[in-house]
Image (tube, coloured by chain):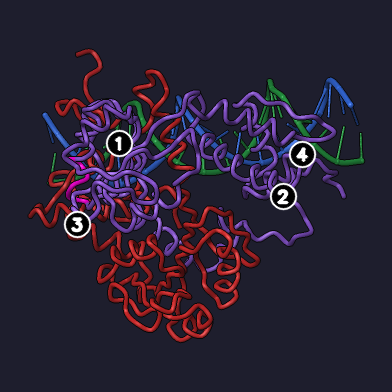
Chain colours: A purple, B red, C green, D blue
Amino acid sequence: VASEKTIGRLSLYRRLLNNLLAEGETHVFSHQLARMARGTAAQVRRDMMAVGYSGSPTRGYDIKELIKSIGHFLDAPRGMNVGLIGVGNLGRAILAYFSGRRPKLSIVAAFDNDPSKINRKIHGCPCFPVNELTKIVREKDIKIGIITVPAEEAQRVADELSAVGVRGLLNFAPVRIIAHRPIYVEDIDVTMALEKVAYFARQPHLDEVAEALTHIPDSEMPVDTESDPDA
Amino acid sequence: VASEKTIGRLSLYRRLLNNLLAEGETHVFSHQLARMARGTAAQVRRDMMAVGYSGSPTRGYDIKELIKSIGHFLDAPRGMNVGLIGVGNLGRAILAYFSGRRPKLSIVAAFDNDPSKINRKIHGCPCFPVNELTKIVREKDIKIGIITVPAEEAQRVADELSAVGVRGLLNFAPVRIIAHRPIYVEDIDVTMALEKVAYFARQPHLDEVAEALTHIPDSEMPVDTESDPDA
DNA sequence: TGTTGTGAATCTCTTCACAGCT
DNA sequence: AGCTGTGAAGAGATTCACAACA
């Protein structure tokens, strides 16, 4: 078990590694991965400790092997089925993005009440009426729910899902869901994110504020400077 | 200036406070706000220190006043204009959600290349062709960009935006943007979020894991127990 | 030389615990 | 009695810095 932050970064590393692989690379050093992930080399190495993968001091990390190790660590061995509730613009965007990818984490059912949406496939995903939620979640062994319904309905949907044994929720509705049994809830709150951007964008010249460190003069690398401090 | 986490929570508190106000409440205690925000009372009080608002020991916080104070602290006095690039499903979802709200943070222009979308209003927001991006950003004094284009185009769009003086980006594309000048970037990475949920949902019985603490038996409150330890 | 892996130090965030107020 | 505001302690996350290795 690792911290929430580490898990998030591992997911990011994996995506970056897949990109590298697609470009034909075979090995990568911690500082390279760090730069792509906007982090530090030490951080990358620390995260690798969590997955238990070791690189070679000469060649760095073997990309293929590392992807496999991260997969071992992150993914459920037999994958996990996901359901999406609320096929509005946002729901469709997510269906489109995930359709076909990630066999270990596939959206196997969508739910909505609009008759024009139900009983057909949307971006490759079958869509059911919401009143069949319980039935289908059981049938398809859905363990994770993505909530993309309007704010007013989010709590009710969450209650239903957790009652049928769903173990995790990704909630896009601008509401803090109150769970009545142990369940992991991750909120994606666009308003909060936008207000954060507005706040930090406005800070006079905290140019070097956390995330803004993205600005790196190409020449110097953010390697932890194991270099001579007297230089 | 406050930490990223504090800013996020303040944005959340404000939304919760507005809900309370709509329900006719006038005052709130730190532990009430904390429960709604899934936090602790001490945390709430600490965050209040950042905005510099003081409550009364007897009545708690005056909701109206507190909302005003948070606004003072978070919002730019004259507001900030926002532009959205990429009017796909996701872009439309965001336009729909923000249309009309937040006068201090309004989306004043959208951009896309699809001829059927440009030169008309979508959810109340005028839509322009992407090749007019620079011109319109200048004209409308846009300071924040929301990137909802496909991954391949995200970096290019970000470069253009930062070149015209945009100071913050909210990026939905599954790409780590490399900034070439100081600019604040906040990524919303749905894949990462979903994988996080999958990971923690799967943990055997770390029922009490961080976010899962949502499960509160209604009776007992997560007040910091300034109570008698001998009881 | 330049890298990895990791104990130790540092930095940041959260919680505790209590004085002060009403 | 029960709350707020806050110094101080505690937890947690990140970074440093160096031994070990190729």
In the image, residue B212 sits, relative to residue A20, either above or below, namely above
What chain is tagged by disc 1? B
Q: CA distance from mark 2 to mark 3?
A: 49 Å
Instruction: Say what secondary structure mark 3 lies in.
Output: helix
A144 sits to left or right of B154: left
B31 sits to left or right of B94: left
**Which residue position is annotated with label 2?**
A23
**Which residue position is annotated with label 4?**
A27
Identified by mark 4, the residue type is His
Give the number of the disc on residue B18: 3
Q: Is residue B44 visible?
A: no
Q: Is residue B76 visible?
A: yes
Q: What is the crowding at mark 1: few (fewer than 14 residues within 10 Å), some, or many (at least 20)?
A: many
Share a chain, discs 1 and 2? Answer: no
Q: CA distance from mark 1 to mark 4?
A: 45 Å
Q: What count of labels does the image hold?
A: 4
Residue D11, percent from left and from top? 46, 26
Q: CA distance from mark 3 to mark 1?
A: 20 Å
Quarter where residue B205 is shown? top left
Pick whichever, A217 or A83, lies toward us: A83
Share a chain, discs 3 and 4? Answer: no
User: In percent of the image, x 30 and y 36: which residue is there?
Assistant: B40
Pick whichever, B91 or A130, lies toward us: A130
**Which residue position is annotated with label 1?**
B40
What chain is tagged by disc 2? A
Instruction: Say what secondary structure mark 4 lies in.
Output: strand
Q: Are marks 4 and 2 in contact (CB under 8 Å)?
A: no
Q: Are marks 1 and 2 in contact (CB under 8 Å)?
A: no
Region rendered in magenta: A151-156
Q: CA distance from mark 4 to mark 2?
A: 11 Å
Pick whichever, D2 or A88, lies toward us: A88
